[in-house]
Image (cartoon, rainbow, N blue to C red):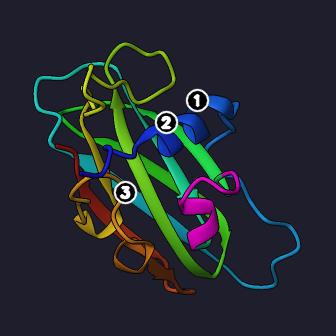
Amino acid sequence: MKKFGFGLLSLALASLALTTLGASSANAPESGVLTFTATGLAGQKGEVRIALYRNAESFEGKKPPSDVGTAPIEDGKARFVFEGMPLGEYAAALFYDKNANGKLDHGMLGKPTESYGFSNNVRGKFGLPPYEKVKFTLTAAGANLEVQLE
């Protein structure tokens, strides 16, 4: 049986200092606005963290995320807006940081004890879902995604 493989995600999120929301890419001739809404947080307080990935290597933890951010929970949702993002392919991982320690916590068997989700609302069976299923494309028209945290 495979071990529940969220260690890479936790390591990547915990090892990075959080950057300001709305990070931009000055060198990109074309950019768009990327908006995420994390749902499934009714009655919760605190914050949700997000990591954005530009390729499978990054998503699998072999390289750091391209952007990270934190958003407060308001009315059972957390909203992230990244402006000036280079157009192209992305994937996202989000989690509810219940104890505000900057990482996705796990139980004794390696299963996450905090709610999490991925772009396209894809779930992995025993770890990260395949990059091919979580990736999406940011176009000049922008992208507005909703991710259910479970």
Q: Is residue 22 visible?
A: no
The extreme front residue here reads 1
What residue would you read off at disc 1?
14
What residue would you read off at disc 2?
10
What are the residue bounds of the magenta stretch?
56-64
What is the x, y in percent for residue 25?
79, 65
Q: What residue is at 27 percent from the left and 19 percent from the top? A: 108
- Mark 2 neighbour density, 10 Å: few (under 14) some (14–19) many (20 or more): some
Q: Name the side, left or right, on which 33 lies relative to 41.
A: right
Q: What residue is at 70 percent from the left and 56 percent from the top? A: 63
Q: What residue is at 30 percent from the left and 31 percent from the top? A: 110
State the mark number for residue 49: none
What residue would you read off at disc 3?
128
Camera-side residue: 60 or 142?
60
Q: Amino acid at mark 3?
A: Leu
Q: Earlier in the sequence, mark 1 or mark 3?
A: 1
Spatial CA distance of label 3 from label 2 is 11 Å
Residues at marks 2 and 1 touching, judged by CB atoms closer than 8 Å:
yes
Q: Name the side, left or right, on which 67 lies relative to 70.
A: right
